[in-house]
Image (cartoon, helix red, strand yellow):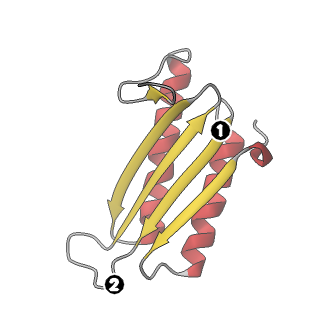
């Protein structure tokens, strides 16, 4: 279990995202930081809800985690609602963190050290 007080959390909002969804997203990120298999140093999330939702999607959630040791994981999802987008984002992050733990710390494909040129 990690101490989320060591993590820097940043949340960016684009469009008409309800305050309850903002708080829900922030709480889910804090939970992720507490339960991650290795310390998370920085988290940046972006929640987007277009003013005029289309039939294809009405919300997106994107996020970047910087883990202890400089490894960066990035994820993006689209969904029908902001709440659903947050849940999908957290599920993908948990999946990637689990894969990282299973590979004994070797970065999964698509993840690069923060200092990579």
Residue closer to the observer: 80 or 49: 49
Label 2 vs 1, first from the N-terminus: 1
Q: Which mark is residue 40?
A: 1
Determine the secondary structure under disc 1. strand
Tell me residue 72's x, y (percent). 50, 34
Determine the secondary structure under disc 2. loop
Please tell me how crowded label 1 is: few (under 14), some (14-19), or many (20+) other residues with Cα within 10 Å.
Answer: many
Which part of the image, by quadrant, shows the N terminus?
top right
Query: On the picture, is 32 further left or further right than 73?
Result: right
Query: On the picture, is 53 further left or further right than 15?
Result: left
**Which residue is labeled 2 in the image?**
51
Q: Tell me: residue 28, above or below residue 75.
A: below
Q: Which mark is residue 109?
A: none
Tell me residue 111's x, y (percent). 42, 29
Mark 2 → mark 1, Cα distance in angstroms: 33 Å
Residue closer to the observer: 111 or 96: 111
- What residue is shown at x 56% (from left), y 23% (from top)? 101
- What residue is shown at x 57% (from left), y 71% (from top)? 22
Tell me residue 100's x, y (percent). 51, 25
Are the residues at dot 2 and dot 1 in contact (C-beta closer than 8 Å)?
Answer: no
Can you name the residue that lies furthest to the left here? Answer: 55
Please tell me how crowded label 2 is: few (under 14), some (14-19), or many (20+) other residues with Cα within 10 Å.
Answer: few
- What residue is shown at x 41% (from left), y 46% (from top)? 75
When asked about the image quadrant of residue 20, the answer is bottom right
Can you name the residue that lies furthest to the front here? Answer: 117
- What residue is shown at x 63% (from left), y 47% (from top)? 32
Tell me residue 91's x, y (percent). 48, 47
């Amino acid at each position: 279990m990690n101490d989320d007080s060591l993590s820097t959390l940043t949340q960016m909002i684009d469009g008409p995202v309800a305050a309850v969804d903002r708080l829900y997203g922030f709480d889910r990120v804090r939970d992720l930081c507490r339960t991650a298999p290795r310390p998370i140093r920085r988290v940046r999330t972006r929640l987007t809800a277009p003013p005029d939702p289309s039939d294809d999607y009405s919300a997106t959630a994107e996020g970047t985690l910087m883990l202890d040791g400089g490894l960066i994981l990035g994820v993006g999802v689209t969904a029908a609602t902001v709440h659903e987008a947050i849940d999908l984002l957290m599920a993908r992050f948990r999946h990637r963190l689990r894969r990282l733990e299973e590979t004994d710390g070797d970065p999964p494909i698509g993840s690069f050290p923060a200092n990579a040129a």
